[in-house]
Structures are given as structure tokens and as C-alpha cells.
Image (cartoon, coloured by chain):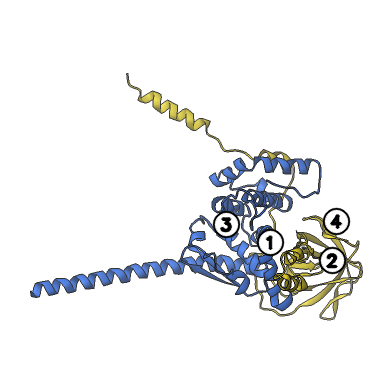
Amino acid sequence: MNKTPYVLLFFLMCGCCAFAIQDDFVNTSLADKNLECPYYQEKYNYNDTTLIPVKLAIKNKVKSENDIYEGQELEFSVVENVVYNNKILVRSGTLATARVETIIANGMNGIPASVILGDFKVGGLESRKLTMEYEKYGVDLSLFVFPLKWLLTPLPPTGSLTNFIKGGHVKFKENEEILIYYHPNWL
Amino acid sequence: MKIRKVLLCLIVILSSIQFCAASEISAHKTNSVQERINSIAFDILNRNKIEKRIVFVYDEAGKKNLLNTDKALTKREVVVYDDMYKAVENDDELAAMLAREISFAVRSFDGVCNGFLRSLQIRAAPKKYEIVADKRAVDYMVNAGYDPVALIIYIQKTAPQLRFDMIHAHNLTSKRLAVIYEYIYTKYPYFLKNNKYIDNKYYQNFLLTSTANRKMLENKIKTNSKEKLDYE
């Protein structure tokens, strides 16, 4: 009896049964959301050197990086008028926003926490011409923890005890200025 | 006797020509790889407006020597070893690999002594900064127009899985992948909803091996929790 047709049929059936695992969680949780492809700047020209400082201050203070989360939008207000060619581009007090891009928790050996802010939106200024990101650090204690550790190394295990000194948290105070730059003539 | 000498000369000439041709081909290959690396790397730098000088070198030597210091931190020179490069299948994956290295190099510029202290911190807490580099790589990739899902694929293919990470200088790869997945889900869900790599066999393998971690994330999203997940 010729078994070839049966063997072929078997392989065909196997092929039909093979399927890719679907990401059900994404399919269900994001199905009804209208999502746009994030903007990216395909062309650039950094020939121009003009840059205008934009001073911002946070609206509600942040005591620690634990109070915020990645992707959160923080509100700021413009501290001083943004002026270019004797023309006011943004008045002081205008609302500005920034997104929390990445949070780095504080660590052992005095390593400070830090928060990276990005996606700045300031009044009518074009976001792509603003500083891309701004990083705020907590108090950096590693500057004296590392030398202390090395000094104590001949007396074990005292050197290792310095591992437990933790770095400072990130704080945003209302009166503290954040300086970013606007490049009016960049593409 | 004369014929023997002529034959010997011919053999020497032919073998030297062959050797020259082989080295020419090898040089041409190295040149084209270097060109590809530079093109993608400088796009990432320019599109992310990174105002720091970083250079990129393709090293045919193969593997990174464990005793060598990380040049991305000390010389701001990203070295792409052949061992890393051979796993790259497309531009997205190459961008993923470069973006991670760039994020290390960028961090080495800030702070005391022109970034010397920051570099020491990265050496002292490699696990923490490994996760940071992964997250920044996702941002750099998106800002430069590359698909961040390729970072998951590249790591899935290349990074081995440790038994424990408690006493190790590196995180469990499964943990890193879960953190990257959560980061993409939270900040750039577009790429997961319109996932062009859904049928990719390496991505499928990631889905297969990350079921428990993805379940944890699912619960977190459902309960609207903001707590940090302890991935396996």
C-alpha cells in the first residue's frame, strides 16, 4: 500500500495546527485605545547656535522619586518671560509640562537617586526645539563614601559597612529653577 | 631544474595574490560593517540631541576580554565586538545594541571630575545601571525612529540566564526583559499594539518564557497599582 498520500496529509495537518502565541494581554488591554506612532525627528540641522534659556519651576513639590512614576506628566510654570528678537515668545507664569522619563532609585555606597525629565511642552514653543532631557540628582554621598571605604579597607569588615550608606532622594521644590534651552532656528 | 624554479615562483606569486585578495575582502567587510554601525549610531546621537562626543569602533577580535575596562565609560568609545555583532539581524537590533552602549557612555560625562565619579558609581552598582541603560535605550530607539521591541529580541537572543542574581553583578535576563516590556507598555504602547515582531520566533520565545512576569504586569495594570514589581 502506498503510504505517501497519508504522510503528506499528516504533514499538512501539522502545518495547519502550528500557530504563533498571541500577546493576549496587549490585545485586550490596548485594543480600544487609539495610539499614535511616537514622533521622531527624521531630519536635523544643528547649524544655528542661537539658544534661549527657559526657566521653569515645579507647581507641586515632589519630596522623593518614590512619589512619582515613569510616564507621569509633571506641571511647571515659566519663571521668566522667554524673549527672542525683542519679542516675548512665552510670558512668565505660563503652564509647562514635562514627562518623567526614567527614575533611578538611590543606592548603596552613597549613590544618589535621579529623575530624567523629557518631552517638555512650554506654551507655544515647538517641543522638538527644546532641550531633549533634564536630569535632577539627589545628594551624592559617594564622593566621600568611596575614599572612606578605601581608607577602612585595611580594617575588615569596616570598609564594607560603608556599603550601607545610601545616597539622597530627588526633590523638586517650588522655588527651585530648572533651566532648559530653546533653539529657535533648529529644524 | 629551470622548470622547477619557475613552478616554485608561480606558486609563491599565486599564493601571495590569493592572500592579498582575502585580506582585501576582509578589509572591505570590516569597512562596510563600520559604516553601518556609524550610520545608525550617529542617527541615534543626532536625533536624540545628545551633546556629547562618542565614537564607535568595530572590533573583529570577537569577544570582550573580561579584564578590559569598559571603554564606553573610560574613553567614551563604544566597541562593537564581532561576538555581539554576529547576532544582529536588522537595523532595529543594531540600534538596540548601540543605544544601550550609548546610554552608558552618556552617563559617564556628568558629575564630579568630568564624570569620573559617575563612572565609578556605574562600576559599583552595575545591576542598577544595567536596568537604567535598558530603559534609556528604549527611549533613544523611539526618538531615533527604531522599534524598541527589537531590544527585547536582541537580549532574548544574546544574554544568558543566570541561576541567581542576589550575589551576582548582573540581573536575571528574564527580569531585564520584563522591565523593558513594562517600560514599552507604559510609555510606548503603540509598538506593542502594532507589533511588527509578533511572528518573530525570538519574540515568540520571549512571550513563551515570560508568561509569569507578564501575568504580574497584567495584575498591576488591572489594579491600577503603581508599585514596583519584583520580576522573576
Q: Is residue A143 visible?
A: yes
Q: Quadrant of residue A91?
A: bottom right
Q: How far, Cα to Cα, is label 4 from label 2?
A: 26 Å
Are the residues tagged 3 and 4 within 8 Å (C-beta)? Answer: no
**B229 left or right of A8?**
right
Q: How far, Cα to Cα, is label 3 from label 4?
A: 34 Å
Q: Amino acid at mark 4?
A: Asp
Q: Which chain is blue?
A: B
Residue A67 is tagged as: 4
The structure residue drawn at horizontal position 61% and vertical position 73%, both measured from the top left corner, is B74
Q: As drawn, which residue projects farthest toward the front?
A: A155
Q: Is residue B137 above or below residue A52?
A: above
Q: Amino acid at mark 3?
A: Asp
Please state the chain letter of the residue tagged with numbered disc 1 in the rendered image.
B
Earlier along the polypeptide chain: callout 4 or callout 2? Answer: 4
Regarding mark 3 in the picture, which secondary structure is present there?
helix
Q: Which chain is yellow?
A: A
Q: Amino acid at mark 1?
A: Tyr
Q: x, y percentage for residue A62?
A: 88, 61
Please state the chain letter of the residue tagged with numbered disc 4 in the rendered image.
A
Q: Residues at marks 4 and 2, common chain?
A: yes
Regarding mark 2 in the picture, which secondary structure is present there?
loop
Q: Residues at marks 3 and 4, common chain?
A: no
Residue that badge 2 annotates: A123
- Quadrant where the N terminus of chain B sits is bottom left
Are the residues tagged 3 and 1 within 8 Å (C-beta)? Answer: no
Earlier along the polypeptide chain: callout 3 or callout 1? Answer: 3
Residue that badge 3 annotates: B92
Q: Is residue B218 above or below residue B158?
A: above
Residue that badge 1 annotates: B129
Name the residue nearer the viewer: A48 or B187.
B187
Q: Residues at marks 3 and 1, common chain?
A: yes
